[in-house]
């Protein structure tokens, strides 16, 4: 099962530009997390935002959460070629249950 | 801490054979593990939840007789793809929720299965 859509499905930008990805989900959540996956590789955890939080920062990452709209956004500022990867949001309905992943956004950053 | 080791990382097998994938929690006890499948250019799809000492819970559309899950100990869960066919070729990833932080999840590095 999947929670919902991420948009855009694919995003191509130049180095130094900002990249914004959006995620929508369908059911109530405990937390929402963002992961990165390089082609053919495993997942790298980026950031977690709790259901009672609205915004969170970590380095060049900024995540927002709007539980009334059941949506989240991930902003990567000053993007680098190394940011090229697929990005997924994932939610859990309650602590300890399986994470359900969105469809993902493929980001391509060209130098 | 909270590392899950997944093996093998890659496997190629002949159609009709079975393949076992192992996930071990190295420094914590994983009472629950989750198995995902990822087809090329797609997202991770939850296949099943395995609980130590009990039967796994499979998601709708996942054949439990084809994807055998065993979670016999607190540190080991295995996924066996039985009578594999080319359409089973995929990336399989395990995950575990770890205690101490209820929101903590850790993932194995994945297994690339190719059935020829």
Image (spheres, coloured by chain):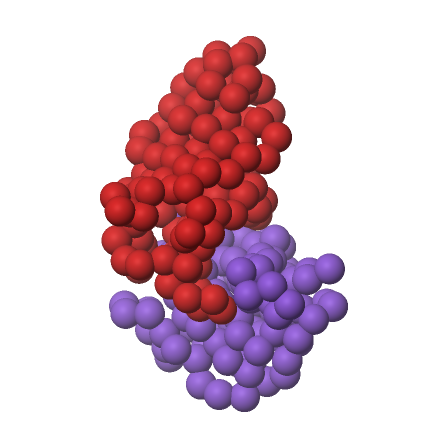
Chain colours: A red, B purple
* Residue at the (44%, 85%) spot, across then down: B55
Residues A35 and A66: in front is A66
Residues B72 and A44: in front is A44
Residues A23 and A83: in front is A23
* Residue at the (49%, 62%) spot, across then down: B14
Residue B81: tell me if it is visible. no
Q: Is residue A10 above or below residue B20?
A: above
Q: Residue furthest bottom?
A: B53
Q: Quadrant of the N terminus of chain B?
A: bottom right
* Residue at the (69%, 71%) spot, across then down: B28
Residue A65: tell me if it is visible. yes
Q: Is residue A98 above or below residue A111?
A: below
- The image position of residue B103, as x and y in percent, is 53, 60
Q: Tell me which corner region of the image, top left, top right, bottom left or bottom right, holds residue B59.
A: bottom left
* Residue at the (55%, 83%) spot, across then down: B52
Q: Is residue A10 left or right of residue A60?
A: left
- The image position of residue B111, as x and y in percent, is 56, 56
């Amino acid at each position: 099962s999947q929670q919902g859509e991420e948009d855009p499905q694919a995003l191509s930008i130049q180095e130094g530009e900002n990249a914004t990805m959006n995620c929508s989900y369908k059911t109530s959540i405990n937390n929402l997390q963002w992961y990165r996956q390089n082609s053919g590789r495993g997942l790298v955890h980026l950031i977690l935002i709790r259901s009672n939080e609205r915004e969170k920062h970590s380095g060049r990452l900024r995540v927002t959460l709007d539980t009334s709209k059941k949506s989240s956004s991930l902003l990567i500022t000053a993007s680098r070629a190394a940011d090229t990867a697929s990005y997924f949001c994932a939610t859990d309905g309650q602590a300890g249950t399986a994470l359900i992943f969105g469809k993902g956004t493929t980001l391509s950053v060209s130098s | 801490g909270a590392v899950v080791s997944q093996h093998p990382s890659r496997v190629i097998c002949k159609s009709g054979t079975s393949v076992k994938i192992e996930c071990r929690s190295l420094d914590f006890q994983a009472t629950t593990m989750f198995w995902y499948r990822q087809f090329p250019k797609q997202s991770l799809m939850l296949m099943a939840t395995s609980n130590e000492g009990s039967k796994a819970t499979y998601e709708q559309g996942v054949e439990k007789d084809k994807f055998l899950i065993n979670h016999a100990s607190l540190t080991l869960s295995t996924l066996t793809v039985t009578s594999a066919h080319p359409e089973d070729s995929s990336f399989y990833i395990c995950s575990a929720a770890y205690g101490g932080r209820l929101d903590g999840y850790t993932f194995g590095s994945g297994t690339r299965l190719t059935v020829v």
